[in-house]
Image (spheres, rainbow, N blue to C red):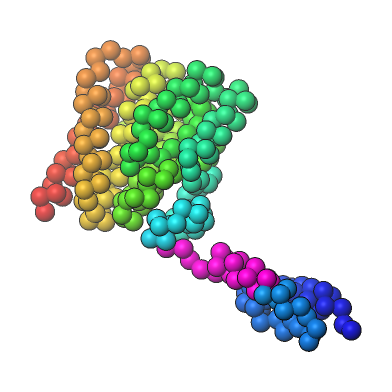
């Protein structure tokens, strides 16, 4: 009697060497003539189920609608999405099921001494405050590492999958990718001003956040106009952007000359972006 395992694995490795690529390999596996007459029928059935599962994972493109409907597909979908919309400033896009992955990330930073216990609790509190909002995504790194070339992870919460696809692309690619670029390269304002770990102590954390968000919102608005996607979700973003503008305009005490100059420049840039949006909305 022939050695069944030897026949199978020799065939497996032979076809693996020839195919080189996993999808081709899986197709080859599905066509292996397994099988001598004494091969166990139950083993064949189980093997085919196993192969079908991997064929589904590696050969089938998951649609956004499928990821919306089935939570177990969302991380695979985000991996696929990242290949389609790559960004060198992003390390990985992570599905943040039940808040767990983001908390693990923060806890790891706390253990390494990158953030304090106070910062950790503040971030968790902030997370809870914004829970359930459509903009519940995070591209986070410790304050002292902004602009040091470290690519952050982006955490995507379940509520984001309630969005229409174009809005999902908008908040992830047009908005959150900008935050990731700021983390890696520093915040680059149009006037040539750059904010990073080298000069960020001249800025209060509140002003730094407003400037960071302003640049991301401007990019989101401009891309939405280009795509002709002035959806209800984008209109909600505009409301949030106007609040940021109001906060910038209300600042009357500054931490430094460079902070004052940056805020005044950004107020003008924000006004121009809001004007573009108003004109596009009328068309």
Quadrant position of residue 106: top right
Percent across and percent down for residue 35 are: 76, 83
- Range of residues picked out in magenta: 46-63
User: Measured along the vertical axis of the image, is residue 260 above or below residue 166?
Assistant: above
For this rendering, which residue is in front, 159 or 38?
38
Query: Would residue 201 be visible to someone looking at this image?
Result: yes
Is 119 left or right of 254, judged from the image as shown? right
- The residue at the point 35 percent across, 14 percent down is 255
Is 75 left or right of 209, judged from the image as shown? right
- Location of the C terminus by quadrant is bottom left
- Location of the N terminus by quadrant is bottom right
- The residue at the point 69 percent across, 72 percent down is 47
User: Measured along the vertical axis of the image, is residue 107 above or below residue 83?
Assistant: above
Which residue reaches farthest left?
A: 282
User: Measured along the vertical axis of the image, is residue 194 above or below residue 254?
Assistant: below
Quadrant position of residue 253: top left
């Amino acid at each position: 009697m022939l050695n069944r395992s030897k026949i199978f694995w020799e065939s497996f490795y032979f076809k693996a060497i020839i195919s080189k690529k996993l999808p081709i390999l899986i197709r080859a596996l599905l066509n292996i003539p397994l099988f001598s007459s004494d091969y166990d029928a139950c083993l064949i059935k189980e093997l085919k189920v196993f192969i079908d599962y991997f064929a589904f994972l590696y050969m089938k493109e998951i649609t956004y609608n499928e990821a919306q409907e089935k939570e177990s597909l969302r991380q695979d979908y985000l991996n696929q999405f990242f290949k389609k919309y790559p960004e060198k400033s992003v390390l990985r896009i992570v599905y943040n099921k039940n808040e767990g992955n983001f908390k693990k990330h923060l806890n790891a930073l706390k253990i390494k001494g990158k953030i304090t216990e106070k910062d950790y609790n503040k971030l968790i509190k902030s997370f809870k405050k914004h829970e359930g909002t459509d903009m519940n995504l995070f591209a986070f790194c410790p304050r002292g590492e902004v602009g040091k070339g470290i690519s952050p992870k982006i955490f995507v919460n379940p509520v984001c999958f309630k969005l229409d696809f174009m809005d999902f692309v908008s908040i992830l690619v047009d908005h959150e990718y900008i935050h990731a670029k700021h983390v890696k390269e520093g915040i680059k304002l149009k006037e040539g001003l750059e904010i990073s770990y080298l000069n960020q102590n001249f800025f209060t954390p509140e002003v730094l956040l407003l400037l960071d968000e302003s640049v991301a919102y401007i990019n989101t608005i401009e891309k939405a106009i280009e795509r002709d996607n002035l959806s209800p979700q984008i209109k909600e973003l505009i409301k949030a952007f106007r609040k940021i503008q109001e906060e910038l305009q209300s600042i009357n005490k500054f931490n430094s000359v460079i902070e004052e100059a940056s805020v005044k420049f950004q107020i003008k840039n924000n006004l121009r972006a809001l004007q573009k949006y108003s004109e596009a909305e009328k068309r």
